Image (cartoon, rainbow, N blue to C red):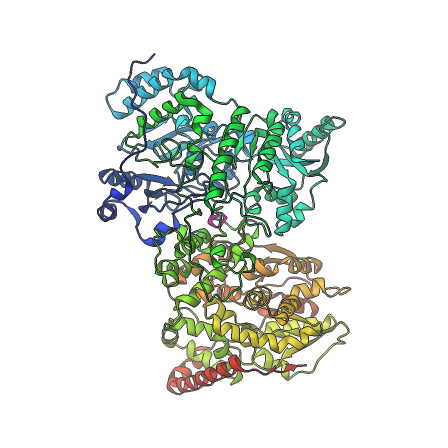
């Protein structure tokens, strides 16, 4: 028994963060730390919460460029008595990642894989490396890190260590504490050392020292010896005990593992600088058996019978979760794969051969047959189908939040855990508790193979009575899980959410041990104070509580139908899942391109949503104080590409492009906008004027003449990049001069002449006409200038956008009322009709009719032209899907059409091309625009062989490809490819775009020289054209006539 005395337990510090000299702290950090020091209102607002119910505005944020810089940052904080909080992906559900402290964000720079030992199956990493990024790097060695939470795309290893993360793969690999060799840690007092398991000889060597590490080890040994019996008896013996500190790692049978004891400590003890991890082999083959049962508790009853078959994952789902996903239109194809039932188990097997995994699945089914646990079932060994089904499970948090027609749901009791053999009974008793409290909406799902249950509960947190009931429920639920010998947390940790409840689970003696354990490392309570030990109450610091009184803005332009017209509810849609912080566009996702190149919280969808939330000033103490005129919000939204990726990819459907347009309209109201807003917003007017006066070649020569391009871009206030070439003849001009062809037996379709097709790439429109006529359609085109208003929407000029779009609705009303289809070629413009228009004109019946009548080129041919057989073209194609097509329209019909043609399309996981309409031309955006393209798209194009087609239906995508160095490759529209196949091109040729596409001709040196010589006259012509264009804009915007359609 050690004779070393133990420190007194930490109690809540009387020292308030408000006492910190913030100005002096900031100045010292800036002078001493190699990193980004951010004390601005925007950064503090973005880091004020995580995925929990809590909100605490930080003192400031430090983004260290190295772990040594982080050490110096902690030293500066120590000099100023400022509390410290380490943060990874910021997805904690118990409030661990928000505090009135200096937040250290390791995820931007401290993200390296430092070494791999393949033989020992270990690696050393910095704390900011994202799990998916790490596993992609380890894949070449046939290894991976075992624990994999559902947030694997953005959670960092440091955050996983702080939380003792698990995930579905913990069925095979265990928790983080089971997959760790050692840690390099930093104490608040500046002590720095590596720690891990400690045999008696090593302990004796360390403890014999006179330094702070020796004192820590002696106190830890004394703590263990003092509470040895209590640790062995009071700690639940279940697979998923994550609540409390890991004092059991100090037991002799666990090798006095100091690193293990620090895992799951939620930044309340030390700062993790590096970690050595244990790795596991990548399994070459997997199979999935989905079992259907009459109820989720009956599914849970079957778990003990399944565990002896050694699945590598065993997850449970209830019918409420599936119903919510159906109601929200999520994962519809995968949901149809489920067997009959109202509760399901997903049982995965893995091995080095497909035969082994298939046999394991069939052995399980044979073992269950004829027993009380015999299920309905489906067996899958197709990796694509398996991924689809796992997405159903991983979507749980997003699916149970903001369900249409249902109450809001919240975390709070979202990861309790019991022994798997008692799970069915626990679920029945938990459901009874839900019924008693009126929380019957709550769904349950989770890691059933380890007894861990996830749920979101409809707590009424906005009124005092609801908060009182929330507290009573959590206290009753805590007592229930203790009665089952379980843990409050089986994955997400305690933080502020469950810290107050821990005495119910561990008793007074272990709670005293926890306080002393913290005192060993952090006697001054400066590490993430108020969490786990001496915690803040679970009903204080609520992000949305009775005292939350946000301002509901008036005069909104969009209808926000999902939120009942409330911008407050729209800004609160984000629940902090953090999928917008994923580093790759796996599975064809787009969100969030600015984060993917910048790796900054404010430039992810979540960070922007947080700032909009703060802008409404519901707490009165928020850092963002200027409402619609907030520069902090403007700066965060400025680098939003308005790609709409979040509208599709965000689990709760945050629509940041709409929020940005709304914000910009109010931000600039009554003020002069930047020149680029006018140049890009009124582009349809100016482009239409140039082509209507047939000035394209002249303007092209001027804008590409030496020296004049920079003058032109400077005058327009846009970025110094190539100006797109105008067509010599617009699509509408070409169409008006030709006679209809074909039989037209299928009926009439209106081909929409969007501004980009019409004035820049009319050949796309021509190709579409020829293809549609050959398919039996009669094509009509509006004869006068028309526009969907996109460029005004994306620049936030919403009053003009509504006038332009309203005129278009009236122009097309007769055609649509007669049942006619409208075919869009430009995805961004087509998406306006299908999405933005209904929110700008929610009560306009003609607008609703038009939204239902609009189809893409691919949809018309694949879904609305029965019996039509496409021409054949045996070619490979890499497909760059436009962001708005991905988010609003979908690309399935296009891919189906290409496959029917005999093509082999490959949907690039490239995300946004980076040009994003006006975005890439606006000042300050050029680097982000190009970095987006260089992330995946341009390297893929450069690496493609010359016979591979580059498909890019979006004008922005084709322009970006043209302007970047893509080895001279150009993007083709699907219409051009189908037209080429109709012309007899049934096999690939070298650089097919050279023969199949016609683009405006770049002016040669002689033409440019002539243009330069005549620049004065040309400028006069352009000014005159601009004047005509502005007058035409006024007429186009305000005109009340229905207009004409060219037939």
Q: Nearer the viewer, residue 32 or 678?
A: 678
Residue 610 inside the magenta-drawn segment: no
Q: Residue at x 21, y 47 (%)?
A: 24
In this orientation, does residue 408 appear? Answer: yes
Q: Residue at x 39, y 38 (%)?
A: 127
Residue 1042 falls left or right of residue 54: right
Whole-percent x, y for residue 347 in the image = 64, 34
Asked if 268 appears above or below 846 in the picture, the reply is: above
Asked if 887 appears above or below 3 in the picture, the reply is: below
- In this picture, which residue range is highlighted in magenta? 578-582
Whole-percent x, y for residue 722 in the image = 43, 70
Asked if 84 appears above or below 807 in the picture, the reply is: above
In the figure, residue 73 lies in which quadrant? top left
In this orientation, does residue 872 appear? Answer: no
Whole-percent x, y for residue 435 in the image = 60, 37
The total number of labels drawn is: 0
Q: Residue at x 67, y 30 (%)?
A: 356
Whole-percent x, y for residue 277 in the image = 44, 31
Q: Nearer the viewer, residue 538 or 672?
A: 538
Asked if 732 appears above or below 331 in the picture, the reply is: below
* Direction top: furthest residue: 1
Residue 787 falls left or right of residue 291: left
| Quadrant for the C terminus in the image | bottom right
| Quadrant for the N terminus in the image | top left
**Secondary structure, magenta segment, majority class:** helix
């Amino acid at each position: 028994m050690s004779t070393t005395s133990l420190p007194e337990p930490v109690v809540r510090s009387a020292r308030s963060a408000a006492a910190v000299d913030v100005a002096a702290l900031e100045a010292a950090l800036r002078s001493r730390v190699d990193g980004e020091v951010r004390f601005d209102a925007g950064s503090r607002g973005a880091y004020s919460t995580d995925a929990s119910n809590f909100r605490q505005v930080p003192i400031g944020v430090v983004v260290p460029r190295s772990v040594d810089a982080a050490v110096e940052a902690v030293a500066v904080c120590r000099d100023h008595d400022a509390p410290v909080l380490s943060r990874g992906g910021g997805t904690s559900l118990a409030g661990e990642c928000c505090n009135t402290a200096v937040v250290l964000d390791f995820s931007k720079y401290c993200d390296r894989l430092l070494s791999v030992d393949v033989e020992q199956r270990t690696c050393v990493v910095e704390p900011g490396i994202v799990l998916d990024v790490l596993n992609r790097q380890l894949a070449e060695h046939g290894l991976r890190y075992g624990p994999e939470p559902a947030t694997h795309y953005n959670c960092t290893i440091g955050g996983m260590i702080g939380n003792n993360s698990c995930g579905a793969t913990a069925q095979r690999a265990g928790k983080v504490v089971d997959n760790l060799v050692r840690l390099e840690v930093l104490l608040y007092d500046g002590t720095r050392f590596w720690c891990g398991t400690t045999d008696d000889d090593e302990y004796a060597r360390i403890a014999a020292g006179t330094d702070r590490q020796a004192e820590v080890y002696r106190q830890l040994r004394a703590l263990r010896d003092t509470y040895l019996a209590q640790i062995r008896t009071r700690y639940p013996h279940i697979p998923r005990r994550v609540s409390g500190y890991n004092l059991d790692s100090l037991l002799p049978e666990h090798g006095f593992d100091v690193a293990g004891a620090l895992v799951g400590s939620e930044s309340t003890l030390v700062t993790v600088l590096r970690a050595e991890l244990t790795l596991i082999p990548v399994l070459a083959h997997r199979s999935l058996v989905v079992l259907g049962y009459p109820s989720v508790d009956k599914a849970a009853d079957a778990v003990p019978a399944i565990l002896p078959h050694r699945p590598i994952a065993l997850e449970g789902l209830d019918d409420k979760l599936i119903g919510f996903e159906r109601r929200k239109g999520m994962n519809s194809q995968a949901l149809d794969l489920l067997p009959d039932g109202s509760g399901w188990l997903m049982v995965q097997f893995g091995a080095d051969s497909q035969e082994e995994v298939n046999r394991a699945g069939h052995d399980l089914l044979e073992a269950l047959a004829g027993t009380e646990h015999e299920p309905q079932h489906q067996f899958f060994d197709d990796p694509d189908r398996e991924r689809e089904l796992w997405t159903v499970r991983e979507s749980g948090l997003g699916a149970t939040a903001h369900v249409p027609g249902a109450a809001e749901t919240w975390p709070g009791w979202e990861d309790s855990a019991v022994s798997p053999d008692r799970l069915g009974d626990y679920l029945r008793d938990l459901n009874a508790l839900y019924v008693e409290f009126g929380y019957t909406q709550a769904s349950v799902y989770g890691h059933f193979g380890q007894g861990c249950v996830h749920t979101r509960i409809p707590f009424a947190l906005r009124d005092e009575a609801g908060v009182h009931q929330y507290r009573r429920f959590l206290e009753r639920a805590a007592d229930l899980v203790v009665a089952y010998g379980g843990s409050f947390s089986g994955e997400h940790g305690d933080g502020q959410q469950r810290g107050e409840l821990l005495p119910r689970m561990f008793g007074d003696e272990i709670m005293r041990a926890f306080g002393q354990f913290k005192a060993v490392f952090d006697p001054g309570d400066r590490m993430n104070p108020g969490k786990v030990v001496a915690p803040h109450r679970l009903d204080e610091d609520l992000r949305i509580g009775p005292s939350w009184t946000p301002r509901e803005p008036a005069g909104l332009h969009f209808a926000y139908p999902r939120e009942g017209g409330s911008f407050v509810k729209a800004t609160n849609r984000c629940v902090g899942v953090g999928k917008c912080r994923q580093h790759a566009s796996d599975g064809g996702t787009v969100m969030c391109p600015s984060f993917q190149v910048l790796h900054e919280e404010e430039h992810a969808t979540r960070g922007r949503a947080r700032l909009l939330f703060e802008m409404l000033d519901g707490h009165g103490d928020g850092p963002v104080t200027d409402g619609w005129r907030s520069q902090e919000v403007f700066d965060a939204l400025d680098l939003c590409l308005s790609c709409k990726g979040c509208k599709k990819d965000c689990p709760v459907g945050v629509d940041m492009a709409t929020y940005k347009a709304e914000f910009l309209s109010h931000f600039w109201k009554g003020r002069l906008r930047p020149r680029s807003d006018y140049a890009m917003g009124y582009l349809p007017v100016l482009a239409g004027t140039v082509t209507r006066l047939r000035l394209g070649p002249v303007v092209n020569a001027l804008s590409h003449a030496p020296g004049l391009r920079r003058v032109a871009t400077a005058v327009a206030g846009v970025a110094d990049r190539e100006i797109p070439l105008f067509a010599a003849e617009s699509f509408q001009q070409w169409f008006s001069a030709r006679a209809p062809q074909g039989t037209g037996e299928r009926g009439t379709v209106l081909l929409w002449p969007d501004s980009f097709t019409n004035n820049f790439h009319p050949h796309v429109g021509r190709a579409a006409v020829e293809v549609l006529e050959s398919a039996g359609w009669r094509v009509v085109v509006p004869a006068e200038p028309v526009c969907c208003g996109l460029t005004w929407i994306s620049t936030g000029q919403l009053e003009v956008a509504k006038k332009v779009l309203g005129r278009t609705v009236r122009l097309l009303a007769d055609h649509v009322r007669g049942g006619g289809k409208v075919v869009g070629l430009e995805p961004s413009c087509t998406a306006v009709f299908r999405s933005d228009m209904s929110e700008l004109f929610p009560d306009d019946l003609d607008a609703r009719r038009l939204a239902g009548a609009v189809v893409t080129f691919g949809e018309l041919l694949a879904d609305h032209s029965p019996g039509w057989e496409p021409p054949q073209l045996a070619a490979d194609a890499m497909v760059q899907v436009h962001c708005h097509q991905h988010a609003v329209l979908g690309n399935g019909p296009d891919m189906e059409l290409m496959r029917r043609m005999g093509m082999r399309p490959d949907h690039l996981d490239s995300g946004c091309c980076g040009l994003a309409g006006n975005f890439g031309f606006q000042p300050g955006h050029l680097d982000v625009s190009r970095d987006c393209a260089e992330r995946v798209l341009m390297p893929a194009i450069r690496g493609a062989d010359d016979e591979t087609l580059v498909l890019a239906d979006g004008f922005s995508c084709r322009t970006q490809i043209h302007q970047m160095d893509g080895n001279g490759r150009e993007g083709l529209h699907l219409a051009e490819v189908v037209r080429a196949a109709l012309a007899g091109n049934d096999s690939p040729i070298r650089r097919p775009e050279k023969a199949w596409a016609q683009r405006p001709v770049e002016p040669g040196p002689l033409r440019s020289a002539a243009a330069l010589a005549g620049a004065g006259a040309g400028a006069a012509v352009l000014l005159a054209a601009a004047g005509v264009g502005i007058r035409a804009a006024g007429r186009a915007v305000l005109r009340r006539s229905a207009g004409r359609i060219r037939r």
